[in-house]
Image (cartoon, rainbow, N blue to C red):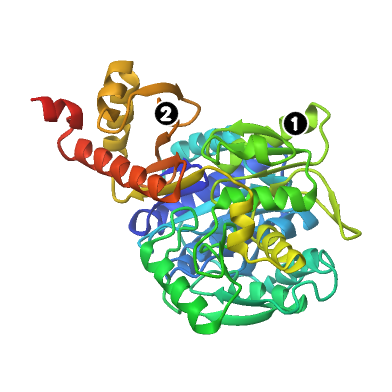
Amino acid sequence: MKFGTSGVRGLVSELEGRASALYTTAFARHLLETGAARAGDTVLVGRDFRASSPGIAATCIGALRRAGLSPVDCGTVPTPALALYGLKLDAASLMVTGSHIPADRNGIKFYRPDGEIDKQDEARITAIAAELDEGEIDVAPGETPDRSAEAEALFAARYAGLLPKGALAGLKVGVYQHSTVARDLLVQVLEAYGAGVVPLGRSEQFIPVDTEAVSGETIDLLKGWTKEHGLAAIVSADGDGDRPLVSDEAGEPLRGDLLGLIAAQFLQAKVAVTPVTSNSGLEKAGGFSVLRTRVGSPFVIAGMLDALQAGKTGVMGFEANGGLLTASPFTVNGKVLEPLPTRDSFLPVLAALSLAAREKRPLSKIAAGFRLPFAAADRLENVPVEASAALMAHLRRSDDNLAAFLAPIAPVSSKSDIDGLRVTLTDGRIVHLRPSGNAPEMRCYVEAETEAAARDLLSLGLRLINAWLTDRTPPAERAGA
Protein backbone atom coordinates (compact mmCIF):
# COMPACT_ATOMS: atom_id res chain seq x y z
CA MET A 1 0.00 0.00 0.00
CA LYS A 2 1.12 3.55 -0.70
CA PHE A 3 -0.19 7.08 -1.04
CA GLY A 4 -0.99 8.39 -4.50
CA THR A 5 -2.44 11.72 -5.55
CA SER A 6 -5.60 11.08 -3.55
CA GLY A 7 -5.10 8.92 -0.49
CA VAL A 8 -3.84 5.40 -0.02
CA ARG A 9 -5.13 2.84 -2.53
CA GLY A 10 -4.72 -0.76 -3.56
CA LEU A 11 -6.47 -4.00 -4.32
CA VAL A 12 -9.38 -4.78 -2.01
CA SER A 13 -7.66 -8.03 -1.12
CA GLU A 14 -4.65 -6.02 0.09
CA LEU A 15 -6.55 -3.21 1.82
CA GLU A 16 -9.15 -5.16 3.76
CA GLY A 17 -8.31 -6.06 7.35
CA ARG A 18 -4.72 -5.46 8.36
CA ALA A 19 -3.77 -2.67 5.93
CA SER A 20 -6.85 -0.54 6.61
CA ALA A 21 -6.39 -0.97 10.38
CA LEU A 22 -2.67 -0.24 10.04
CA TYR A 23 -3.03 3.02 8.10
CA THR A 24 -5.98 4.20 10.19
CA THR A 25 -4.05 3.60 13.40
CA ALA A 26 -1.07 5.44 11.92
CA PHE A 27 -3.36 8.33 10.96
CA ALA A 28 -4.79 8.46 14.48
CA ARG A 29 -1.35 8.46 16.08
CA HIS A 30 -0.22 11.20 13.72
CA LEU A 31 -3.21 13.35 14.68
CA LEU A 32 -2.45 12.86 18.38
CA GLU A 33 1.30 13.42 17.99
CA THR A 34 0.86 16.68 16.10
CA GLY A 35 -1.92 18.01 18.32
CA ALA A 36 -4.42 17.97 15.46
CA ALA A 37 -6.58 15.83 17.76
CA ARG A 38 -6.71 14.98 21.44
CA ALA A 39 -7.82 11.78 23.12
CA GLY A 40 -11.57 11.38 22.77
CA ASP A 41 -11.92 13.79 19.84
CA THR A 42 -14.41 13.06 17.06
CA VAL A 43 -13.24 11.57 13.77
CA LEU A 44 -15.75 11.27 10.92
CA VAL A 45 -15.89 8.19 8.69
CA GLY A 46 -17.57 8.14 5.28
CA ARG A 47 -17.64 5.63 2.44
CA ASP A 48 -18.72 5.06 -1.14
CA PHE A 49 -20.99 2.34 -2.56
CA ARG A 50 -18.32 -0.27 -3.32
CA ALA A 51 -19.14 -3.69 -1.92
CA SER A 52 -15.90 -3.62 0.09
CA SER A 53 -16.39 -0.14 1.58
CA PRO A 54 -18.69 -0.97 4.54
CA GLY A 55 -16.29 -3.62 5.82
CA ILE A 56 -13.23 -1.41 5.43
CA ALA A 57 -15.06 1.48 7.11
CA ALA A 58 -15.98 -0.78 10.04
CA THR A 59 -12.32 -1.78 10.39
CA CYS A 60 -11.33 1.90 10.39
CA ILE A 61 -13.94 2.68 13.04
CA GLY A 62 -12.59 -0.08 15.27
CA ALA A 63 -9.02 1.12 14.81
CA LEU A 64 -9.91 4.73 15.59
CA ARG A 65 -11.67 3.75 18.82
CA ARG A 66 -8.74 1.60 19.96
CA ALA A 67 -6.44 4.56 19.26
CA GLY A 68 -8.40 6.64 21.77
CA LEU A 69 -10.54 8.68 19.38
CA SER A 70 -14.34 8.83 18.94
CA PRO A 71 -15.35 7.73 15.44
CA VAL A 72 -18.67 8.89 13.96
CA ASP A 73 -20.26 7.08 11.02
CA CYS A 74 -21.33 9.45 8.22
CA GLY A 75 -22.45 6.68 5.89
CA THR A 76 -22.43 7.02 2.11
CA VAL A 77 -21.90 10.75 1.57
CA PRO A 78 -19.93 12.71 -1.04
CA THR A 79 -16.34 13.34 -0.02
CA PRO A 80 -16.79 17.16 -0.13
CA ALA A 81 -19.82 16.81 2.19
CA LEU A 82 -17.73 14.81 4.66
CA ALA A 83 -14.91 17.36 4.46
CA LEU A 84 -17.32 20.27 4.97
CA TYR A 85 -18.83 18.57 8.02
CA GLY A 86 -15.35 18.03 9.40
CA LEU A 87 -14.51 21.71 8.94
CA LYS A 88 -17.69 22.69 10.80
CA LEU A 89 -17.02 20.35 13.71
CA ASP A 90 -13.25 20.97 13.68
CA ALA A 91 -12.91 17.22 13.37
CA ALA A 92 -10.59 14.97 11.40
CA SER A 93 -12.16 12.54 8.96
CA LEU A 94 -11.47 9.71 6.58
CA MET A 95 -13.30 8.56 3.47
CA VAL A 96 -13.25 4.96 2.29
CA THR A 97 -13.32 5.23 -1.49
CA GLY A 98 -11.47 4.26 -4.61
CA SER A 99 -13.10 7.11 -6.54
CA HIS A 100 -13.23 6.10 -10.22
CA ILE A 101 -11.02 3.00 -10.17
CA PRO A 102 -12.47 -0.53 -10.64
CA ALA A 103 -14.46 -2.22 -7.90
CA ASP A 104 -11.69 -4.72 -7.11
CA ARG A 105 -9.72 -1.78 -5.71
CA ASN A 106 -10.42 0.67 -2.92
CA GLY A 107 -8.72 3.34 -0.87
CA ILE A 108 -8.84 5.72 2.09
CA LYS A 109 -8.63 9.52 1.96
CA PHE A 110 -7.52 11.26 5.16
CA TYR A 111 -8.41 14.74 6.41
CA ARG A 112 -7.09 16.82 9.29
CA PRO A 113 -9.61 19.07 11.05
CA ASP A 114 -8.53 21.91 8.73
CA GLY A 115 -8.70 19.93 5.49
CA GLU A 116 -6.84 17.36 3.41
CA ILE A 117 -3.58 15.96 4.68
CA ASP A 118 -0.51 17.15 2.80
CA LYS A 119 2.58 15.37 1.54
CA GLN A 120 4.41 15.81 4.85
CA ASP A 121 1.47 14.19 6.64
CA GLU A 122 1.54 11.34 4.14
CA ALA A 123 5.23 10.75 4.79
CA ARG A 124 4.77 10.66 8.57
CA ILE A 125 1.71 8.41 8.39
CA THR A 126 3.64 6.05 6.13
CA ALA A 127 6.56 5.98 8.58
CA ILE A 128 4.28 5.27 11.55
CA ALA A 129 2.55 2.52 9.57
CA ALA A 130 5.92 0.92 8.84
CA GLU A 131 6.74 0.92 12.56
CA LEU A 132 3.35 -0.56 13.47
CA ASP A 133 3.65 -3.19 10.76
CA GLU A 134 6.42 -4.88 12.71
CA GLY A 135 3.96 -5.96 15.40
CA GLU A 136 0.45 -7.33 15.76
CA ILE A 137 -2.49 -5.25 14.57
CA ASP A 138 -6.03 -5.65 15.89
CA VAL A 139 -8.41 -5.68 12.91
CA ALA A 140 -11.67 -6.08 14.84
CA PRO A 141 -14.43 -3.91 13.30
CA GLY A 142 -16.34 -1.29 15.26
CA GLU A 143 -19.77 0.33 15.25
CA THR A 144 -20.79 3.90 15.95
CA PRO A 145 -23.84 6.18 15.64
CA ASP A 146 -24.83 7.30 12.12
CA ARG A 147 -24.85 11.07 11.52
CA SER A 148 -25.01 11.00 7.72
CA ALA A 149 -28.22 13.06 7.66
CA GLU A 150 -26.44 15.98 9.36
CA ALA A 151 -23.54 15.86 6.90
CA GLU A 152 -25.88 15.77 3.90
CA ALA A 153 -28.05 18.62 5.23
CA LEU A 154 -25.03 20.85 5.81
CA PHE A 155 -23.78 20.24 2.29
CA ALA A 156 -27.19 20.91 0.71
CA ALA A 157 -27.42 24.15 2.71
CA ARG A 158 -24.05 25.26 1.28
CA TYR A 159 -25.62 25.48 -2.17
CA ALA A 160 -29.07 26.74 -1.19
CA GLY A 161 -29.43 30.34 -2.36
CA LEU A 162 -26.24 30.33 -4.40
CA LEU A 163 -28.31 30.85 -7.55
CA PRO A 164 -31.40 33.03 -7.89
CA LYS A 165 -34.71 31.31 -7.17
CA GLY A 166 -35.84 29.32 -10.20
CA ALA A 167 -32.46 29.85 -11.92
CA LEU A 168 -32.69 26.47 -13.67
CA ALA A 169 -36.41 26.59 -14.48
CA GLY A 170 -37.12 25.35 -17.98
CA LEU A 171 -33.90 23.33 -18.09
CA LYS A 172 -34.43 19.59 -18.48
CA VAL A 173 -31.42 17.84 -16.98
CA GLY A 174 -30.58 14.17 -16.67
CA VAL A 175 -28.74 12.92 -13.60
CA TYR A 176 -26.70 9.80 -14.35
CA GLN A 177 -26.94 8.26 -10.91
CA HIS A 178 -25.05 4.97 -11.41
CA SER A 179 -23.32 4.23 -8.08
CA THR A 180 -22.09 7.68 -7.10
CA VAL A 181 -22.77 8.78 -3.54
CA ALA A 182 -23.78 12.16 -4.98
CA ARG A 183 -26.75 10.75 -6.89
CA ASP A 184 -29.59 11.76 -4.57
CA LEU A 185 -28.12 15.09 -3.47
CA LEU A 186 -27.61 16.10 -7.12
CA VAL A 187 -31.29 15.55 -7.82
CA GLN A 188 -32.26 17.44 -4.67
CA VAL A 189 -30.06 20.47 -5.37
CA LEU A 190 -31.07 20.78 -9.04
CA GLU A 191 -34.77 20.42 -8.35
CA ALA A 192 -34.53 23.14 -5.70
CA TYR A 193 -33.57 25.58 -8.48
CA GLY A 194 -36.45 24.53 -10.70
CA ALA A 195 -34.69 22.15 -13.09
CA GLY A 196 -36.71 19.32 -14.57
CA VAL A 197 -34.65 16.36 -13.43
CA VAL A 198 -34.67 12.93 -15.08
CA PRO A 199 -32.85 10.29 -12.96
CA LEU A 200 -30.95 7.84 -15.16
CA GLY A 201 -28.97 4.62 -14.85
CA ARG A 202 -29.20 4.04 -11.11
CA SER A 203 -27.25 0.92 -10.17
CA GLU A 204 -26.94 -1.17 -7.04
CA GLN A 205 -23.68 -2.58 -8.39
CA PHE A 206 -20.62 -0.33 -8.33
CA ILE A 207 -19.78 1.24 -11.71
CA PRO A 208 -16.36 2.92 -12.00
CA VAL A 209 -17.00 6.19 -13.86
CA ASP A 210 -13.87 8.17 -14.68
CA THR A 211 -14.90 11.77 -15.36
CA GLU A 212 -11.48 12.67 -16.78
CA ALA A 213 -11.31 9.86 -19.33
CA VAL A 214 -14.97 9.10 -20.01
CA SER A 215 -15.35 5.64 -21.54
CA GLY A 216 -16.95 5.08 -24.93
CA GLU A 217 -19.61 2.97 -23.24
CA THR A 218 -20.54 5.84 -20.92
CA ILE A 219 -20.62 8.33 -23.81
CA ASP A 220 -22.95 6.02 -25.73
CA LEU A 221 -25.29 5.99 -22.73
CA LEU A 222 -25.22 9.79 -22.48
CA LYS A 223 -25.93 10.24 -26.18
CA GLY A 224 -28.81 7.79 -26.08
CA TRP A 225 -30.40 9.41 -23.04
CA THR A 226 -30.13 12.98 -24.32
CA LYS A 227 -31.85 11.99 -27.55
CA GLU A 228 -34.48 9.85 -25.84
CA HIS A 229 -35.47 12.43 -23.23
CA GLY A 230 -34.66 15.69 -25.03
CA LEU A 231 -32.21 16.80 -22.36
CA ALA A 232 -30.27 20.06 -22.21
CA ALA A 233 -27.51 18.29 -20.26
CA ILE A 234 -26.68 15.23 -18.23
CA VAL A 235 -24.74 15.61 -15.00
CA SER A 236 -23.07 13.07 -12.76
CA ALA A 237 -20.02 12.51 -10.56
CA ASP A 238 -17.46 9.83 -9.84
CA GLY A 239 -17.87 7.23 -7.10
CA ASP A 240 -17.21 9.51 -4.14
CA GLY A 241 -18.81 12.61 -5.63
CA ASP A 242 -15.82 14.93 -5.80
CA ARG A 243 -15.33 15.01 -9.60
CA PRO A 244 -18.13 16.25 -11.89
CA LEU A 245 -19.36 14.93 -15.21
CA VAL A 246 -21.38 17.29 -17.40
CA SER A 247 -22.47 16.44 -20.93
CA ASP A 248 -23.98 18.83 -23.44
CA GLU A 249 -27.33 18.46 -25.21
CA ALA A 250 -25.83 15.87 -27.58
CA GLY A 251 -24.36 13.74 -24.81
CA GLU A 252 -20.78 14.90 -25.38
CA PRO A 253 -18.90 15.34 -22.07
CA LEU A 254 -17.42 18.76 -21.34
CA ARG A 255 -13.78 18.69 -20.35
CA GLY A 256 -13.16 19.04 -16.63
CA ASP A 257 -10.79 21.97 -17.10
CA LEU A 258 -13.47 23.77 -19.13
CA LEU A 259 -15.86 23.25 -16.21
CA GLY A 260 -13.16 24.72 -13.97
CA LEU A 261 -12.87 27.73 -16.26
CA ILE A 262 -16.65 28.25 -16.21
CA ALA A 263 -16.69 27.93 -12.42
CA ALA A 264 -13.80 30.38 -12.04
CA GLN A 265 -15.70 32.96 -14.06
CA PHE A 266 -18.88 32.17 -12.13
CA LEU A 267 -17.02 32.93 -8.88
CA GLN A 268 -15.19 35.91 -10.44
CA ALA A 269 -11.96 34.38 -9.21
CA LYS A 270 -8.72 36.32 -9.36
CA VAL A 271 -6.35 33.36 -9.08
CA ALA A 272 -6.88 29.81 -10.36
CA VAL A 273 -4.45 27.07 -9.37
CA THR A 274 -4.52 24.06 -11.66
CA PRO A 275 -2.22 21.18 -12.69
CA VAL A 276 -0.06 21.20 -15.77
CA THR A 277 -2.48 18.72 -17.38
CA SER A 278 -5.24 21.33 -17.64
CA ASN A 279 -5.82 22.99 -21.02
CA SER A 280 -3.03 25.28 -22.22
CA GLY A 281 -5.60 27.86 -23.34
CA LEU A 282 -6.67 28.78 -19.81
CA GLU A 283 -4.15 31.58 -19.49
CA LYS A 284 -5.71 33.41 -22.44
CA ALA A 285 -9.37 32.59 -21.85
CA GLY A 286 -9.91 33.00 -18.15
CA GLY A 287 -9.60 36.63 -17.11
CA PHE A 288 -7.69 35.47 -14.01
CA SER A 289 -4.11 34.54 -13.27
CA VAL A 290 -3.22 30.86 -13.56
CA LEU A 291 -0.72 29.02 -11.36
CA ARG A 292 0.36 25.55 -12.56
CA THR A 293 1.17 22.60 -10.29
CA ARG A 294 1.79 18.89 -10.35
CA VAL A 295 -1.24 16.61 -10.64
CA GLY A 296 -3.19 15.92 -7.46
CA SER A 297 -5.28 17.90 -5.02
CA PRO A 298 -2.45 18.12 -2.42
CA PHE A 299 -0.39 20.10 -4.94
CA VAL A 300 -3.32 22.31 -5.92
CA ILE A 301 -4.02 23.00 -2.25
CA ALA A 302 -0.36 23.85 -1.63
CA GLY A 303 -0.47 26.23 -4.59
CA MET A 304 -3.61 27.91 -3.25
CA LEU A 305 -2.02 28.32 0.18
CA ASP A 306 1.06 29.88 -1.44
CA ALA A 307 -1.21 32.35 -3.25
CA LEU A 308 -2.98 33.26 -0.02
CA GLN A 309 0.32 33.73 1.79
CA ALA A 310 1.41 36.03 -1.04
CA GLY A 311 -1.58 38.24 -0.26
CA LYS A 312 -3.79 37.10 -3.14
CA THR A 313 -7.59 37.11 -2.83
CA GLY A 314 -10.27 35.33 -4.82
CA VAL A 315 -8.19 32.14 -4.85
CA MET A 316 -9.63 28.86 -6.11
CA GLY A 317 -8.33 25.79 -7.87
CA PHE A 318 -9.46 22.99 -10.13
CA GLU A 319 -8.12 19.84 -11.70
CA ALA A 320 -8.41 18.52 -15.24
CA ASN A 321 -10.98 16.07 -13.86
CA GLY A 322 -13.24 19.03 -12.98
CA GLY A 323 -12.94 18.77 -9.20
CA LEU A 324 -13.09 22.33 -7.84
CA LEU A 325 -11.53 23.71 -4.65
CA THR A 326 -11.92 27.10 -2.97
CA ALA A 327 -9.32 28.71 -0.71
CA SER A 328 -10.97 32.12 -0.36
CA PRO A 329 -14.55 33.03 0.53
CA PHE A 330 -16.58 34.02 -2.54
CA THR A 331 -19.81 35.99 -2.65
CA VAL A 332 -22.31 34.83 -5.27
CA ASN A 333 -25.88 36.09 -5.51
CA GLY A 334 -25.42 37.76 -2.12
CA LYS A 335 -24.44 34.47 -0.47
CA VAL A 336 -21.00 33.98 1.01
CA LEU A 337 -19.51 30.67 -0.02
CA GLU A 338 -16.97 29.73 2.62
CA PRO A 339 -13.69 28.04 1.58
CA LEU A 340 -13.79 24.31 0.90
CA PRO A 341 -10.23 23.31 -0.01
CA THR A 342 -11.05 19.85 -1.31
CA ARG A 343 -12.43 18.64 -4.64
CA ASP A 344 -16.15 19.29 -5.11
CA SER A 345 -18.37 18.30 -8.05
CA PHE A 346 -21.47 20.36 -7.19
CA LEU A 347 -20.15 23.89 -7.74
CA PRO A 348 -18.93 23.30 -11.33
CA VAL A 349 -22.23 21.56 -12.18
CA LEU A 350 -24.24 24.53 -10.92
CA ALA A 351 -21.94 27.02 -12.64
CA ALA A 352 -22.28 25.30 -16.03
CA LEU A 353 -26.04 24.77 -15.85
CA SER A 354 -26.75 28.29 -14.60
CA LEU A 355 -24.68 29.72 -17.48
CA ALA A 356 -26.67 27.69 -20.01
CA ALA A 357 -29.97 28.76 -18.42
CA ARG A 358 -28.98 32.43 -18.16
CA GLU A 359 -27.68 32.74 -21.71
CA LYS A 360 -30.37 30.43 -23.14
CA ARG A 361 -27.72 28.74 -25.24
CA PRO A 362 -26.88 25.06 -25.56
CA LEU A 363 -23.82 23.89 -23.69
CA SER A 364 -22.14 22.85 -26.95
CA LYS A 365 -22.26 26.46 -28.17
CA ILE A 366 -21.03 27.78 -24.85
CA ALA A 367 -18.10 25.33 -24.87
CA ALA A 368 -17.16 26.22 -28.44
CA GLY A 369 -17.27 29.92 -27.58
CA PHE A 370 -14.29 29.62 -25.26
CA ARG A 371 -12.13 28.59 -28.24
CA LEU A 372 -9.81 26.44 -26.17
CA PRO A 373 -7.46 24.04 -27.95
CA PHE A 374 -9.12 20.66 -28.38
CA ALA A 375 -7.94 18.31 -25.67
CA ALA A 376 -8.40 14.61 -25.07
CA ALA A 377 -7.17 12.15 -22.48
CA ASP A 378 -7.30 8.42 -21.88
CA ARG A 379 -5.35 5.71 -20.11
CA LEU A 380 -4.02 2.20 -20.44
CA GLU A 381 -5.32 0.22 -17.48
CA ASN A 382 -3.64 -2.58 -15.53
CA VAL A 383 -0.15 -1.28 -16.28
CA PRO A 384 2.24 -2.34 -13.49
CA VAL A 385 3.78 0.62 -11.71
CA GLU A 386 7.24 -0.76 -12.48
CA ALA A 387 6.50 -0.84 -16.21
CA SER A 388 5.25 2.75 -16.41
CA ALA A 389 8.20 3.88 -14.28
CA ALA A 390 10.60 2.13 -16.68
CA LEU A 391 9.04 3.92 -19.65
CA MET A 392 9.28 7.32 -17.98
CA ALA A 393 12.88 6.67 -16.90
CA HIS A 394 13.79 5.74 -20.49
CA LEU A 395 12.20 8.90 -21.91
CA ARG A 396 13.86 11.12 -19.31
CA ARG A 397 17.27 9.52 -19.81
CA SER A 398 18.03 11.54 -22.93
CA ASP A 399 16.42 13.88 -25.43
CA ASP A 400 17.30 11.34 -28.12
CA ASN A 401 15.19 8.69 -26.40
CA LEU A 402 12.23 11.06 -26.20
CA ALA A 403 12.64 12.15 -29.80
CA ALA A 404 12.87 8.55 -31.02
CA PHE A 405 9.77 7.56 -29.08
CA LEU A 406 7.71 10.42 -30.56
CA ALA A 407 9.26 10.24 -34.05
CA PRO A 408 6.19 8.47 -35.52
CA ILE A 409 4.17 11.58 -34.54
CA ALA A 410 6.39 14.67 -35.00
CA PRO A 411 9.70 16.18 -33.87
CA VAL A 412 9.94 17.59 -30.35
CA SER A 413 10.02 21.36 -29.87
CA SER A 414 10.07 21.64 -26.06
CA LYS A 415 9.19 19.70 -22.93
CA SER A 416 8.08 20.24 -19.35
CA ASP A 417 8.77 17.80 -16.52
CA ILE A 418 6.58 19.29 -13.78
CA ASP A 419 4.57 16.06 -13.58
CA GLY A 420 5.22 13.43 -16.20
CA LEU A 421 6.53 14.62 -19.56
CA ARG A 422 4.49 17.29 -21.33
CA VAL A 423 5.91 17.67 -24.82
CA THR A 424 5.15 20.43 -27.32
CA LEU A 425 5.75 19.20 -30.87
CA THR A 426 7.10 21.35 -33.69
CA ASP A 427 3.61 21.60 -35.21
CA GLY A 428 2.19 22.99 -31.94
CA ARG A 429 0.40 19.83 -30.80
CA ILE A 430 0.92 18.62 -27.22
CA VAL A 431 1.49 15.10 -25.93
CA HIS A 432 1.65 14.58 -22.16
CA LEU A 433 2.70 11.19 -20.78
CA ARG A 434 2.10 10.52 -17.10
CA PRO A 435 1.70 7.44 -14.91
CA SER A 436 -1.31 7.65 -12.59
CA GLY A 437 -0.37 8.58 -9.05
CA ASN A 438 -2.91 6.26 -7.43
CA ALA A 439 -3.71 3.41 -9.82
CA PRO A 440 -1.86 0.97 -12.12
CA GLU A 441 -2.54 3.12 -15.17
CA MET A 442 -0.52 4.96 -17.77
CA ARG A 443 -2.22 8.17 -18.87
CA CYS A 444 -1.91 10.19 -22.06
CA TYR A 445 -3.17 13.76 -22.51
CA VAL A 446 -3.11 15.58 -25.85
CA GLU A 447 -4.05 18.91 -27.41
CA ALA A 448 -4.55 19.76 -31.08
CA GLU A 449 -6.33 22.32 -33.28
CA THR A 450 -9.40 20.17 -34.01
CA GLU A 451 -11.34 17.52 -32.12
CA ALA A 452 -10.59 14.91 -34.78
CA ALA A 453 -6.88 15.73 -34.68
CA ALA A 454 -6.85 15.46 -30.88
CA ARG A 455 -8.52 12.07 -30.95
CA ASP A 456 -6.16 10.80 -33.64
CA LEU A 457 -3.18 12.07 -31.66
CA LEU A 458 -4.48 10.42 -28.49
CA SER A 459 -4.98 7.10 -30.28
CA LEU A 460 -1.47 7.21 -31.69
CA GLY A 461 0.02 8.20 -28.34
CA LEU A 462 -1.66 5.28 -26.58
CA ARG A 463 -0.48 2.89 -29.30
CA LEU A 464 3.11 4.04 -28.88
CA ILE A 465 2.90 3.59 -25.11
CA ASN A 466 1.37 0.15 -25.47
CA ALA A 467 3.96 -0.94 -28.04
CA TRP A 468 6.83 0.10 -25.77
CA LEU A 469 5.30 -1.55 -22.75
CA THR A 470 4.80 -4.73 -24.75
CA ASP A 471 8.45 -5.33 -25.55
CA ARG A 472 10.29 -2.48 -23.77
CA THR A 473 11.63 -1.26 -27.12
CA PRO A 474 10.72 2.21 -28.42
CA PRO A 475 8.60 1.92 -31.57
CA ALA A 476 10.97 4.08 -33.65
CA GLU A 477 13.95 1.84 -32.76
CA ARG A 478 11.93 -1.29 -33.50
CA ALA A 479 10.91 0.08 -36.89
CA GLY A 480 14.52 0.78 -37.80
CA ALA A 481 15.78 -2.61 -36.70
| Numbered label tally | 2
Q: Are discs 1 and 2 less than 8 Å apart at CB?
A: no
> What amino acid is found at the position of numbered circle 2 in the picture?
Val
From the image, tell me which residue sits under label 1.
Answer: 307
From the image, tell me which residue sits under label 2.
Answer: 423
- The image quarter containing residue 52 is bottom left
Compared with 334, 473 (above or below) is: above
Residue at point 79% right, 33% down? 308
Residue at point 65% right, 43% down? 31
Quick check: 248 left or right of 330?
Answer: left
Q: Could you tell me if residue 403 is visible in this image?
A: yes
Disc 2, SS: strand
Q: Residue 140, labelled with which disc?
A: none
Image coords of residue 394 (percent x, y): 28, 24
Residue at point 42% right, 64% down? 208
* Cα gap from disc 1 to disc 2, whole angstroms: 27 Å
Quick check: 395 left or right of 227?
Answer: left
Disc 1, SS: helix
For label 1, the crowd category at 10 Å Cα-Cα, with few meaning under 14, some 14 to 19 and many 20 or more, is: many
